[in-house]
Image (tube, coloured by chain):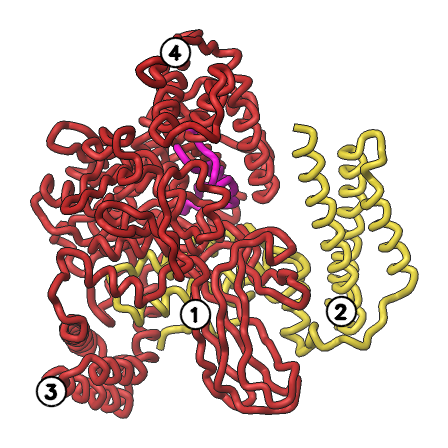
Amino acid sequence: MALLQIAEPGQSTKPHEHRLAVGIDLGTTNSLVATVRSGVSETLPDENGQHLLPSVVRYQKDSVEVGDAAKAHAVDDPLNTIVSIKRLMGRGIDDLKTLSHQLPYQFAETESSVPRIMTAAGDKTAVEVSADILKALKLRSEQTLGDELVGAVITVPAYFDDAQRQATKDAAKLAGINVLRLLNEPTAAAVAYGLDSGREGVVAIYDLGGGTFDISILRLKQGVFEVLATGGDSALGGDDFDHAIAEWIMSQAGLDKASISHSTARLLLREACKAKQALSDTESVELNIVLDEKQTWFGSLNRDTFNQLVDPLIKKTMMSCRRALRDSAVDKDDVMDVVMVGGSTRCLRVREQVGAFFARDPLVTIDPDKVVAIGAATQANALAGNNPDGDMLLLDVLPLSLGIETMGGLVEKIIQRNTPIPVSRAQNFTTYKDGQTAMAIQVVQGERELVSDCRSLARFELRGFPPQVAGAARIRVTFQVDADGLLNVSASEETSGVKAQVEVKPSYGLSDTEIETMLRDSMEHAGEDKDARSLREQQVEADRVIEALDAALADDGDEMLSSDEKDAILAARHQLQTAREQASDSKQLKQAMAALEKASASYVARRMNASVQKSMAGHKVEEFKSEESEL
Amino acid sequence: MADDLFSRNFFEIFQVPAGFVVDFDKVDPLYRELQKSYHPDRFVSSTDQERRLAIQNASLINQAYQTLKEPVPRAQYLLKLKGMDIDAETDTTMDAEFLMQQMEFREAIAEVRSNADPLDELDTMLSVLKNDLQILADKFNTLYTESALADAREVVRKMQFLIKARKEIDTLSEELENELL
């Protein structure tokens, strides 16, 4: 909680206090919330005993329904009942062309790059719809556990790009949830399985959900889960099985895809889904579908036909498995376990094919719908500091390469996919015209060579560097990816030392202003003045900073600081204290905090290194040597 | 006073001597141990300043590890430590015989589709390539040890060519495999 109060890594600063943290699996079809109670990670049911919350939101003029209540209206009120919203997270207007056949909504004409769905409650973005799902889960956990939430680990498909991750984080912010970490779903599943076994080795996580597919290759060693490679397809899942069946029904029933209504489309999908589930238990399923008052279609679907319909989709997942194995430089034979995640792995055909590919029976002992939330809760509990004994660490990788546009619309890769994160890379750029004082950099994510084939993340405009002859300026741009897989860019002009101004224009995400507006519009913040809230937040932060600094100085200030250094820090502290008492706008407070941060930077770094070395000491030499001799 | 990661070179971070041959039995466990201490997940409840610092430290550890892990970045880094700038070599010409070989090799890759069993052929090419890379790596190690740095840099450039060719083979194998599915 506190500046400079560095606890032992992995420990809370207040070890005796249990801090309520949850894991949230924000799924395409269903969502779940889980927490650790009495040492056991378990999902939380609603008041009716239901663990799965359908990821469905229905908007009416004055009300919002989430879950089963909303799902009940999917057929009779399709335009106001939003399903599979995860597919739209971080997606832009341009993506609608490829996605719209699966999203039967009406989209508003808008100048923003973010699609807005027209509902009875006004236009809604994917972030807002997801925030409503998250709010429902937050409420469920706080009501069940009777305490306020400290934070949550929210899972995302490993294959999610920067825009999709950012959208997920924005949704959490909008729902008033503090995100401890965005965790890749497969990694979360591995955690759920990994804790009991205590084995060391390579694990493959095959995660086929409603709308996404992920394959991850992980190595578990020394209490570190190292993601070796991830791959997958962010637009492939069990829903596609349903679509394949629905299209088969349409062709069998002689229905024209273009002329059927939204509600018939929904009906067919629902029947297709039921048929798919039934085929896990029976060889053949009878279908009778009431198309309207006059017309009912009868037919039957057997396993062979079903397999033919879904095999091309399953084969697509195998291509991703192959690539992930290649990327991780791991042989199929080296894989110790295959973990199955996601409701779609209940499908027998999927289990058969995965088993055949890896030549071993996949693990299915934990409910594939719950395993991700259970793992996320375990990690949330550890991150919140409730589990000082567990020192397991999850090392993730960048799922998709990051690059920039160069001449001719080509991509120059800055950070390759599957690079362990956090990671930072700096790249130098120069001007091509005399007197040039600004330049634009297009950042993309993806594996293809052409910019047009990759996902555009943002445009950065660097400006304010001094005019020089062409090629003389050296603009150093630093790309920093944090542990959540989110990109941050900073830039400076090196010859003059001018910090170039970076203006980020997210290509698909929401701008800060848009989020601010949504926050203001949302219920819990209604009526509150933005500036007043900002000031109050800064005041709380200032108190935190001062309290922590005092504690740190009392602890080792005299030991670690020369008297000059200490005086400089105390002077900055005094300034902040004064600003805290007198400042009427948040800007002044921010400046005072930045000044204190600068004055204490070296002290903070020294304390962190000292603390880390203390935690590593002891086994630093001896353990590694013994391990070395074993190998 | 506590030791700062940023004041050490990549080999010092993992407590191994700076050289082309690296003892990964020592580096790998220390990598995990360092990440367990510095990773931002260990500082979730700390202040923004500390979290930024943790991200920087963990990024540095990752960068150092990735550099040591792969032969070409490792070789380049060794040369950089000796004061050689890898990027500032625009006027150097490559030896003609090597370039000729490379062109022929690339042509062979491009024409592999006309082969009866292209995947098998690519596998053969890959093992030839691996062998060539090993020879170059050994050569680099010798030259570097003898402090023949300019010659060592030439060897690194040749290795870069081969790595590019290997990427082409990988991409093509992937394409062919997908077509066969």
Regarding mark 4 in the picture, which secondary structure is present there? strand
- Do the residues at pointers 2 and 1 share their chain? no
Q: The residue under label 2 is which amino acid type?
A: Arg
Along the polypeptide, which appears first: circle 1 or circle 3?
1
Q: Nearer the viewer, residue A351 or A213?
A: A213
Q: The residue under label 4 is which amino acid type?
A: Leu
What is the spatial separation of the Cα atoms under label 4 and label 2, in whole angstroms? 70 Å
Outermost residue on the front side: it is A294
- Is residue A363 left or right of B74 when viewed as pictured? left
What is the spatial separation of the Cα atoms under label 3 and label 4, in whole angstroms? 73 Å
Q: Are marks 4 and 2 in contact (CB under 8 Å)?
A: no
Q: Which residue is mark 2?
A: B153
- As drawn, the label of residue A504 is 1
Q: The residue under label 3 is which amino acid type?
A: Gln
Q: Bounds of the magenta span?
A: A210-238
- Do the residues at pointers 3 and 4 share their chain? yes
**Colour given to chain B in the rendered image:** yellow
